[in-house]
Image (cartoon, rainbow, N blue to C red):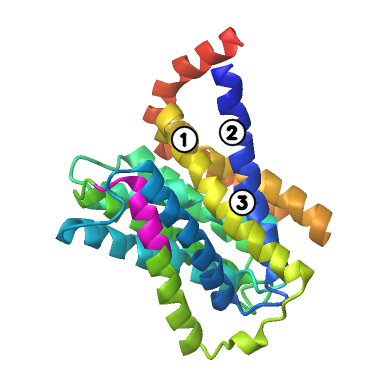
Amino acid sequence: MTRYRNLLLFVLLAAAWGSAFMAIKAGLAYIPPVLFAALRYDVAGLLMFLYAFYATDRPIPSGRAQWTVVAVGATLIIAGYHSLLFIGETDPAVTSAAAAVIVSLSPVLTTGFARLFLPDERLTIVGIAGLLLGLVGVVILSNPDPDNLLAGGAVAKLLIFGAATAFALGSVLTRRIDADLPIETMEAWSMMGGALIMHGISLGLGESPAEAVWNLESLAALAYLALVASALGFLIYFDLLDRLGPIQINLVSYVAPVFAALAGWVVLTEVPTVYTVVGFLVIFVGFVLVKRRAVRAELPRIRRLILRS
């Protein structure tokens, strides 16, 4: 039963995180982007904070290293990632699927940054090729017009690429700092800190709460992102991280775009382009090259799970 439970939770996580791109797109029709992201983590941060008190014996960070980890998470993983992602998704040329595919580059970028900032990691020639291939995939997906680089959502897609970069860099830096902080506590305080930062960015950009239109669609989008994609999604993620390990759980980034495309098609009538599909395939090949040793080490375990099924 455990293997079926893990498979079900994996699919649920991919569905929650994939369909979140559709919910972002839907909510942006009514709420300014950075304010929308901040409100999402006002709610999700409070819920995660309560969960941290329930699940750990260290719900409050202490010491310089632990607060540094929280600051990195709040700045890069929450505020940097979500501000750029939400702004990028305001462009009508960026579909839910396209945004999800660009974000799926995060595991590749994470490995690249790990080779730079973690002393026990090294990037081989093949690894460099995989990293470059992932970047090529983003270029294919962006499909820029050389005569007009502002057309076709190219700039918006580059903003989302910046979001994936911020997330990857933040993930590596939090690993580099030896803080010994429960991940639930780190996520809770990072979410709350990131929400505060995004409220500041929102004010700096001239966004006003008065611009938000509150109706069934906007409230549903906010509730879905805060409760399902963030609170429930991270609870599932923590559980699967312990059971499956980081390599298998990373694969959720490559299943999520499928659900993003389906949700975008059903709810927003978005149709993925051929560039979205090709870009996704190129990024996935890049991931396999970068993570080839880890993937190779996981294959016997995956075969055993399949045979036992």
Element marked by disc 1: helix
* Mark 3 burial class by Cα count in 10 Å: few <14, some 14-19, many 20+: many
Disc 1 crowd, CA 10 A, few/some/many (<14, 14-19, 20+): few
Residue drawn at x 80%, y 61% is 268
- Disc ID at residue 239: 1
Q: Amino acid at mark 2?
A: Leu
SS at badge 2: helix
Position of 148 relative to 290 (above/below): below
Q: Mark 1 touching mark 2, by CB under 8 A?
A: yes
- Let me know if residue 270 appears in the view: no
Tell me what residue is drawn at x 42 percent, y 74 percent: 196
Is residue 152 positioned above or below 243 on the image? Answer: below
**Marks 1 and 3, how far apart at CA:** 15 Å
Figure quadrant of the N terminus? top right
Residue on which disc 3 sits: 228
- Magenta span contains residue 185: yes
Q: Position of residue 239 (x, y in %)?
A: 46, 35
Residue 57 in percent (x, y) is at 29, 44
Question: Which quarter of the figure is the C terminus placed in?
Answer: top right
Q: Amino acid at mark 1?
A: Asp
Comes first in the chain, label 1 or label 2:
2
Picture quadrant of residue 209: bottom right
Residue beneath disc 2? 9
As drawn, which residue projects farthest toward the bottom?
206
**Residue that appears at 37% across and 50% down:** 53
Q: Which residues are magenta?
A: 181-191
* Relative horizontal placement of residue 236, taking residue 243 as reference (left or right): right
* Distance in Å between CA atoms under marks 3 and 2: 13 Å
Q: Residue 3 versus residue 219: which sits nearer the camera?
A: 219
